Amino acid sequence: MSKAVAGEVKATPSSQKHPADINQTGAWQLVGKEITVPYPKLKTEKGPVLQGASANFMYSGGSVPAGPASAPLPPIPSMVKLDPKPTKLKTPQKPVLVEGDTLKDAFGNELAVSVVSAKMTTK
């Protein structure tokens, strides 16, 4: 089965609360924007072919126990790094991201291929 080559990725922060957040008021946020690793010598109508991607997330807000009271929960970082799986289409260094490639961290933060080429597949 052929798959379309990735043109863009999208990071989605989790709606899960961090287990250390005792009052469950914090939230995950995307820090900056998605970071992509393009292969500069191969392009599609959607842009460069992607060899990988990553996204940084941060949990902020909420509280932790502090004796009889509570204290602010320090920010908690998490990074999701999406690497390609083996396909028939490879650059000289490694495979490329294709439709369906996705990864979630232990907290539910997700990085997934969101836009694919209509003209280039792994056939």
Image (cartoon, rainbow, N blue to C red):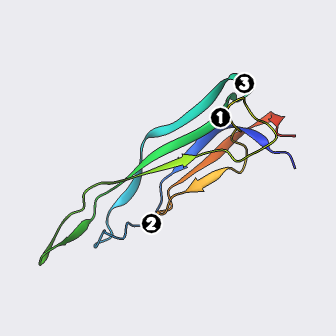
Mark 1, Cα crowd under 10 Å, few <14 / some 14-19 / many 20+, is many
> Looking at the image, is mark 3 or mark 2 earlier in the sequence?
2
Residue drawn at 47 percent across, 38 percent down:
33
Residue drawn at 36 percent across, 71 percent down:
19
Find disc 1 in the rendering and name its residue: 50
- 80 lies left or right of 60: right
> Looking at the image, is mark 1 or mark 3 earlier in the sequence?
3
Residue drawn at 49 percent across, 63 percent down:
106
Quarter of the picture containing the C terminus is top right
Q: Position of residue 112 (x, y in %)?
A: 61, 49
Foreground of the two, 57 or 123: 123
Q: Position of residue 100 (x, y in %)?
A: 71, 51
Report the disc number at residue 42.
Answer: 3
- 35 lies left or right of 42: left
Element class at badge 1: strand
Q: In which quadrant of the rendered view does residue 50 lie? A: top right
Foreground of the two, 18 or 118: 18
Mark 2, Cα crowd under 10 Å, few <14 / some 14-19 / many 20+, is some
Report the disc number at residue 16.
Answer: 2
For the residues labelled 1 and 3, the Cα–Cα distance comes to: 9 Å
**Kind of residue indicated by mark 3:** Leu
For the residues labelled 3 and 2, the Cα–Cα distance comes to: 38 Å
Foreground mark, 3 or 2, reads 3
**Kind of residue indicated by mark 1:** Leu
**Kind of residue indicated by mark 2:** Gln
Residue drawn at 12 percent across, 76 percent down:
67
For the residues labelled 1 and 2, the Cα–Cα distance comes to: 29 Å
87, above or below 42, in the image:
below
Element class at badge 3: strand
79, above or below 70, in the image:
above
